[in-house]
Amino acid sequence: DRMGKVKNLAKIDKIEYAITYSADAFEDNWKKRLKYYNKTSEYKTNLNLLKNDIDQTLPPTKPKSNVLFIYMGIPGSGKTAISNILLNLELGVILQSDWIYFTKLKDQLEGDYYKAYVYLEELTLYYLKKGYSVICDGNSRTHKVRQTEYNLAKEAGVECVLISIDVDLDTAARRVTLKGGGEDRYEEHIKRLSVFQSQMEYPDKKEQKTIKIIRIDGKESLEKIKLKLEKELIKLQIL
């Protein structure tokens, strides 16, 4: 999985350190190491393949005002479920580093998960500039990671909407287990998720003034979450 890739590439022994590294320290590391990757023929070929696939999933119409949706929430909080709600509302295209790496380019990228982030940034900017809203299905839990996304939104001339999802560790761990994490690994999931939770850097007052935030209770039913999202999106004049 992703944390395993982080451990191997960064030569980190403990999963707790890998989680930390994947959240923040990796930001400078992979950008420096892959600074010129987007100039390679491999990158250009793969990028066109990804665009061709994504173009098949674009909503039928562009929104009057497109935005960049990003998430803050531990694994199992419901980020992908909320992305699907937004998708069904025809609010944009979902972009996810896991999809880029595990589903589309795992063989081509030869174990280097970080290359998926190069594609993710390029695709995010590309579709925002084309007038579509982009739903980045990831976990932007630190100020530094979010700042990169704010910069992309600024470059595209759109606003950024942070969807912050709160959920307790037990609920999240049980969801991760149901998704194939192994019933006998519940305690291990709790331990990892508690590390994720401890590293959440919630927007301070200065950051809150620059973005729009929608807060979601991740324990609610999907129907209640959908209604809450619709209400908030109407208030923000996105729906």
Image (cartoon, rainbow, N blue to C red):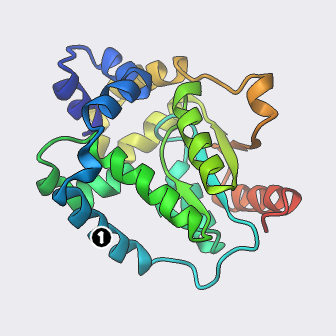
Q: Quadrant of the N terminus?
A: top left
Taking 1 as reference, is 83 left or right? right
- Tell me where residue 18 appears, x and y as whole percent: 31, 21
Any part of residue 100 in sight:
yes
Residue at image position (37%, 50%) is: 97
- Tell me where residue 200 appears, x and y as whole percent: 57, 23
Taking 123 as reference, is 153 left or right? right
| Pick the front one: 167 or 30 | 30
Residue at image position (66%, 45%) is: 163
Any part of residue 187 in sight:
no
Taking 131 as reference, is 50 left or right? left
Q: In which quarter of the image is residue 213?
A: top right
Q: How many labels does the image show?
A: 1
Residue beneath label 1, please? 48
Residue at image position (80%, 23%) is: 205
Q: What element carries label 1?
A: helix
| Pick the front one: 119 or 212 | 119
Q: Quadrant of the C terminus?
A: bottom right
Query: Please, is residue 89 above or below residue 199 in the view?
Result: below
Q: Which amino acid does label 1 sit on?
A: Asn
- Tell me where residue 188 appears, x and y as whole percent: 33, 24
Residue at image position (54%, 26%) is: 144
- Tell me where residue 36 appears, x and y as whole percent: 26, 42
Q: Quadrant of residue 156?
A: bottom right
